[in-house]
Amino acid sequence: MKQLTIGSVKLDNPFILAPMAGVTDLPFRVLCKEQGAGLICMEMISAKAILYKNKNTEALMKIHPSEHPVSLQLFGSDSEIISEMAKQIEDRPFDILDINMGCPVPKVVNNGEGSALMKNPALVREIVSKTVKAIRKPVTVKIRRGFDEDHVNAVEIAKIIEDCGAAAVAVHGRTREQYYAGKADWEIIRQVKEAVSIPVIGNGDIDMPEKAVQMMNQTGCDGVMIARGARGNPWIFSRTLQYMETGEASSKPDKEEVIHTMLRHARMQLEYKGAYTGIREMRKHIAWYTSGFPKSARLRSAINEIETYEELKKLLLSL
């Protein structure tokens, strides 16, 4: 098994749960860790929200002891705020600090944050260098192929990130303009890998074990980040590990195991977020878990009417 070390943090394997807003909350991260994810990434957190002590941000930063190693991701565009907030929270139990320079969402981009930073290499340099100097923990950065087809500059940005002392860079093979449409460009990941000496983590279109290994072989990347392919599918990590080791992926979980996991996930959500929010948060997860189930469209409609855990349990056990 190829080893991946990020700064002072050694991972058991190179398969990483990507940070996804509204998805990689604590309960889901715990499930992915149990399935063998080598690194768990949290939802992105606004550096300004930490500064202004936003009450919802505290819950986002909660970490379960079983998650380690875990990466906390900050986003923002003010180098002083990002570096100072990184320093302020460094004593929290995360292992790696990641800086988001890949989010394509308009409300983030329109503030000059996320993937908008790729249009400003000088600001990238300022943010990364100040943050690296501010804390002792490893700093990583997540970027995209570029902002649009006229500005494909992942290699340039990755070189700046390395020059500033970051411990690794993750590259999503799409531009911001693409969002998640079309096919991810793995060639740009290969180009970044050849251009820098720090670990490069590839991201984009990994929805089955074979693709994770294919990406490593094709690009030479040091790690693989799994995002949408993990939604409703924490087993992708255990199946990928088996495929990496044996050349054969285990079969997908049967319906009973999926139902058992959905109900456990729901109980964890209710404990973590309360009954009202927890059951509503589960609706999207159930839709992902049951994609491909017989009559799944009708099931998703029924799930949106669910108000309690008992109603959810009754519905799922009737499948």
Image: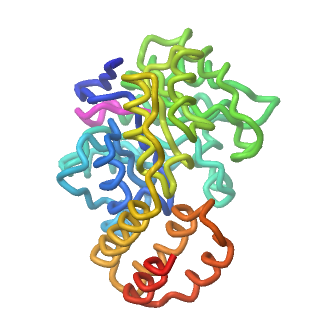
Q: Is residue 54 above or below residue 29?
A: below
Q: Position of residue 36 (x, y in %)?
A: 31, 40
Q: Is residue 197 above or below residue 318?
A: above
Depth check, front residue: 94 or 22: 22
- Does the magenta segment cover residue 28? no
Residue at (38% x, 21% y) in the render: 165
Q: Quadrant of the N terminus?
A: top left
Depth check, front residue: 27 or 52: 27
- Does the magenta segment cover residue 139? yes
Depth check, front residue: 84 or 36: 36
Residue at (46% x, 36% y) in the render: 127
Q: Position of residue 296 (x, y in %)?
A: 64, 70
Taking the image as shown, residue 157 lies to the left or right of residue 50, namely right
Depth check, front residue: 94 or 205: 205
Task: State the colouring used for the structure image.
Answer: rainbow
Tell me which segment is drawn in magenta. 132-140
When asked about the image quadrant of residue 267, the answer is bottom left
Residue at (50% x, 12% y) in the render: 196
When asked about the image quadrant of residue 313, the answer is bottom left
Q: How many marks?
A: 0
Taking the image as shown, residue 189 lies to the left or right of residue 129, namely right
Residue at (30% x, 31% y) in the render: 138
Q: Position of residue 206 (x, y in %)?
A: 57, 37
Q: Position of residue 52 (x, y in %)?
A: 38, 66
Q: Which residue in the rendered view is the most extreme toward the right?
A: 150
Q: Is residue 316 above or below residue 293?
A: below
